[in-house]
Amino acid sequence: MTEWAKCTWIEARELVSDRVVALLPIGCTEPHGPHLPLDTDVTIAASQATRAAQLLGELGVRALVLPPIAYGVTNYTEGFAGRLTIRPGTLWALVEDVIEALEQEGVRQIVLVNGHLEPAHVTVLRGVVLDHAKRTALKAQAILADNTRRRWAATLGEEFLSGDCHAGRYESSLVLHADPDHVRASRAQLAPVAIDLLAKMNTGVTSFKAAGASEAYCGDPASASAEEGRDLLERLARIVVESARETWPDLFA
C-alpha cells in the first residue's frame, strides 16, 4: 500500500502501471452531533481506503491511496454551524477531473471510496462513474464501492440499514477506532435519537433539523465502541476489495 501524496514524482513514476488500483477517498465537512468532528466522513473514507489497500496488497494487487476529497453535497446539515457544502456540479467536475488526471498518469483502475451517505452526494458519484463508462475513448475505468446498495448495507449492521446512523453507533464506532482523540467524552451521555430518516426522506424532508435531529445526530452514539469500529472498518474495506475483484478479476489471477 502506498500513499500517493507521500511519493516523490520519481517514486510515483515507478509505481504507476496499468495494473495498479487507485483508491480515492471521498467525504465531506459537516456537523456530526456534539461529539464527532466535522471531518468524520473523511476519516471513515480514508481509513476504509487504507485498510482496503492493505488487503489488496495481501492478495498481490498493488494499490495507491489518493489524498481524500473533503468536500461534498451536504444539504441535510443545513442550519448547523460547520457545514461546508459544494454544488453537485462542483463535486462532479472535481471527481471527474481527478479520474481523468489519473488516466493521464497511466492508471487504469480507480475506485471511489465514499464515506458521506447523503443521497444527493451519492447520486453524483454514481453519475460520474456511469458517464465515464460511456466515453469509449477513455482507457481508465472508475467504479464506486457503493455501501448504500442493499447488498453491502446488509453487512453493516441494523443501525446502518435503518438510515438513522448519522453520527450514531455506526459512525461513532468507526471514529472511536480510527481517530479516538477527536471523539468528545459527551458521546457517552447522549440519548438515542430515532427519527425514521428514510421514511421522512421519502416524504420530502430535506434536512436533519426538519426530520427531528435537533443536535445533528440520529441513532445511538452512546452504544458505540472502538471494537465495533474495527469490525465495521474491516467490512467496509472488504466491500472495496470485492468490488475491485468483481470488476477486474484478472488482477487477482
Image (cartoon, helix red, strand yellow):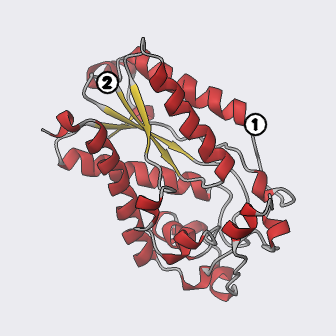
Q: Is the residue marked by circle 1 packed among few (<14), some (14-19), or many (20+) residues within 10 Å? A: few
Q: Amino acid at mark 1?
A: Arg
Residue at mark 1: 87
In the rendered view of the protein, which quadrant contains the N terminus? top left
Identify which residue is drawn at 32% across, 18% down.
13
Nearest to the observer: residue 211 or residue 166: 211
Vertical relation: 42 (above or below) 10: below
Identify which residue is drawn at 60% across, 59% down.
40
Q: Position of residue 54 (x, y in %)?
A: 28, 50
Outermost front residue: 203
- Give the quadrant of residue 196: bottom right
What is the distance, in whole Å, between disc 1 and disc 2 at their CAs? 35 Å
Identify which residue is drawn at 83% across, 58% down.
81
Left or right of 95? Residue 48 is left
**Residue 252 - label:** none
**Residue 11 - label:** 2
Nearest to the observer: residue 189 or residue 198: 198
Vertical relation: 37 (above or below) 56: below
Which is nearer the N-term, disc 1 or disc 2? 2
Left or right of 29? Residue 2 is left
Nearest to the observer: residue 129 or residue 180: 129
